[in-house]
Amino acid sequence: MANMTRVTEFILIGFSLSPQTEIILFFLFLMFYLVTVSGNLLIITITLVSHRLHAPMYFFLRNFSVMEILFTSITVPKLLAGLLFHSKTISYHACMAQCFFYFFVGVTEFIFLAIMSFDRYVAICHPLRYTTIMNNRVCIQLLLAAWVGSFFPILFSGLILFQVPFCGPNVVNHFFCDSIALEKIACTDTRPVELMNLILASLLLCSSLVVTTVSYIYIVTTVLRIPTAKGRQKAFSTCASHITVVSITYGTHLFMHVRPTGTNSLDLNKAVALMTTVVTPSLNPFIYTLRNEAVKQALRETIIKKKCTS
């Protein structure tokens, strides 16, 4: 093992399509990326400038938008460069860094979705105590807990992957440095690493899913006790956008982990990763604006104010 020559770079084969198809995909993915960045920047801006959105719910939404921009920016720019310039190579250290930050920010998002579910639970089940419980200090503590809670487990996993020897081949069957694709080309038995990663991912994702599920069980139970249909509709409307994002996010990841394994598992991993890194982040700004009356009203007020001052 000591005499093995470690690779200094990897080749990301991506989708291996014709040049014409890759150009089409470049413009398609670029459009999704620009929508993701601009849409989430709009949410960040509107929740900062609009006084009606200075509430814990929108503090969390603003930070979730920051995470979405970071998450998609970890992989998409390299994907776009590969499609346009056929730049398929990535250095070893850049690959390890991309792998680490992809899972770090991704797991942080899952934890943050659970925190946002808890916020909705407090708002609906304890409305009179909501501002007391979810004060600024608690919101900041929960934000830090999400980042710290994912950093150390993913750092531990990343350090283990960093010790795995890669001596050739150096061709990665993916469009970014995914740990599963990297483990396939390692020069040693990676089954212990795969098992450890599976246990770690299951603990992190399942714990956030449990918090989300329990929160919504209490929310549904509380809402069903509201005597009027209008009151129930109003209560559910405050959760509609978050439920939609949770369903899409957890749905794609559960499909990837629960599906039957087969020879095309890596190709399916690429398809699901494409959905989670390119498509889903571009949908979230529309979900949170079109299904949230407060955000839509704040946008109208901001546009009207800008027209009046210009």
Image (spheres, grey):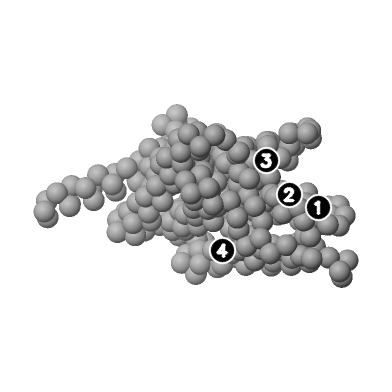
- The answer to whether marks 2 and 1 mark residues whose Cβ atoms lie closer than 8 Å is yes
Q: Secondary structure at mark 3?
A: helix
One can see residue 57 in this view: no
Q: Which kind of residue does numbered mark 1 sit on?
A: Glu
- The answer to whether marks 4 and 2 mark residues whose Cβ atoms lie closer than 8 Å is no
Alpha carbon of mark 3 to alpha carbon of mark 1: how far? 15 Å
- The answer to whether marks 3 and 1 mark residues whose Cβ atoms lie closer than 8 Å is no
Alpha carbon of mark 2 to alpha carbon of mark 3: how far? 9 Å
Q: Which callout, 3 or 4, points to the residue nearer the camera?
A: 3
Upstream in sequence: badge 3 or badge 1: 1
Which mark is drawn over residue 144?
none
Alpha carbon of mark 3 to alpha carbon of mark 4: how far? 31 Å
Q: State the image quarter where residue 50 is shown.
A: bottom left
Q: State the image quarter where residue 111 is shown.
A: bottom right
Which mark is drawn over residue 180?
2
The residue that disc 1 covers is: 194
Upstream in sequence: badge 3 or badge 4: 4
User: Looking at the picture, does residue 229 appear above or below residue 127?
Assistant: above
The residue that disc 3 covers is: 269
Q: Which kind of residue does numbered mark 3 sit on?
A: Asn
User: Looking at the picture, does residue 71 appear above or below residue 270?
Assistant: below
Q: Which kind of residue does numbered mark 2 sit on?
A: Ile
- The answer to whether marks 2 and 3 mark residues whose Cβ atoms lie closer than 8 Å is yes
Upstream in sequence: badge 2 or badge 3: 2
Residue 226, image x, y percentages = 50, 36
The residue that disc 4 covers is: 142
Upstream in sequence: badge 2 or badge 1: 2
- The answer to whether marks 4 and 1 mark residues whose Cβ atoms lie closer than 8 Å is no
Q: Secondary structure at mark 4?
A: helix
